[in-house]
Amino acid sequence: MKKMGKVAMFFLALLLIVPSALAAPDLSEQHTFYEEINYMMERDVITGYPDGTVRPDAVVTRAEAAIMIGRLKDLDGTQRETKFPDVTANQRASGYIASAEEAGYVSGFTDGTFRPYAAITRGDMAIIVDRLFSLGLTAQVDFTDVSQNMRAYEAISRILAGNITIGYPDNTYRPSASVTRGQFAAFLGRGLEPAFKNKAAIPASFMKDKTKTYIYQTPEGIERHSYANVPDRSGREYGFMWSVVSDIGTGEALYGEIETHRTFGLQFIPQDIYVLDLQYPVRLGDSFTDENNQVFTVTAVGQTVTTDYGTFEDVVEVTVNGYKHYYAEGHARIRVDNPQGDTVNQLIGME
């Protein structure tokens, strides 16, 4: 048998000590962020430790965040001196910190330091994600612990509108809380892949599946609603959102679905018009008013409703100006009937 060369032995050793998510003893398939961590490990953004662990619940430091950002964006990680007095060339992450700062993905503090060993917070993470990805929509932020004078406010607004976060059930965002490796993977994964955005939803969400195309019969013809990364338009970055194409060639319409633990609605581009569809929890008899002072009233719950696509259970009926709008979990609005009882808009297919 031929002897194995030193280089080959070195790479074999790397394979033995750097685990995949599938082999990590501390990451089960039941972990909330198992798929996101596995996805980031496949992209070499997150790596395991020499002891074979992944440590999904370990807190991410600012230096570690810079390394993961650098790997994601293929930045130069060569160790070198930086502009920060507390990050020397001896710091393992110095190259990525310098590159990420130069690219505008991270920044230091007002005292000139970077604080590489401080934990990344959820406020920091919102700013990083906002800088990494094209997020064209903004949402009204009603988290009880987020105010407009906060540095991360605009970024939180955009990651909320971009279906990257919905906050916590108590309607907080917790901007000062630390971010774990699993949460970091989830934030990045949702910025990259629509399938992961589906997890940024309340239980029994009414938002549509972002991996599907929804087909509607409308007064303007057949419309196809697909979730896609929309190229820049008129100097504005849009990123992922719903694109509507009609068979009568009326041009493309764009909108985003925005959901929190309190509301579900649509944001239309480029008019920046927000339409409130539902308030949570959905309760029979509840009414709410949109920005145009239209009154929406929940007039039925638990309905069975049929469209040309199929039959839906547990449907919510909302009445506005005599029109009845029907909403089904995972499908948003499936049908609209006018005051005379005629169906004027309905879901007729999915792909």
Image (cartoon, rainbow, N blue to C red):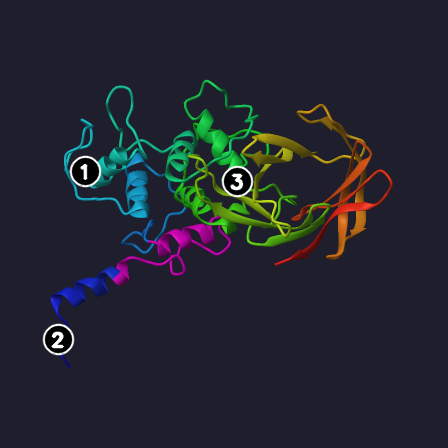
As shown in the figure, which amino acid type bears the numbered disc 1? Gln
Task: Answer yes or no: is residue 26 visible.
Answer: no
In the rendered structure, find residue 3 and report the number of the disc placed on it: 2
- In the picture, residue 122 is in which quadrant? top left
Assess disc 1: are there few (<14), some (14-19) or many (≥20) residues with their C-alpha within 10 Å of its C-alpha: some
Labels 3 and 2: the sequence-earlier one: 2
Tag 1 residue: 91
- Residue at screen point 17% across, 67% down: 8
As shown in the figure, which amino acid type bears the numbered disc 2? Lys
Q: Nearer the viewer, residue 322 or 278?
A: 322
As shown in the figure, which amino acid type bears the numbered disc 3? Asn
Tell me where residue 40 appears, x and y as whole percent. Answer: 38, 51
Q: Nearer the viewer, residue 63 or 240?
A: 240
Assess disc 2: are there few (<14), some (14-19) or many (≥20) residues with their C-alpha within 10 Å of its C-alpha: few
Toward the top, the furthest residue is 149
- Residue at screen point 76% across, 34% down: 283
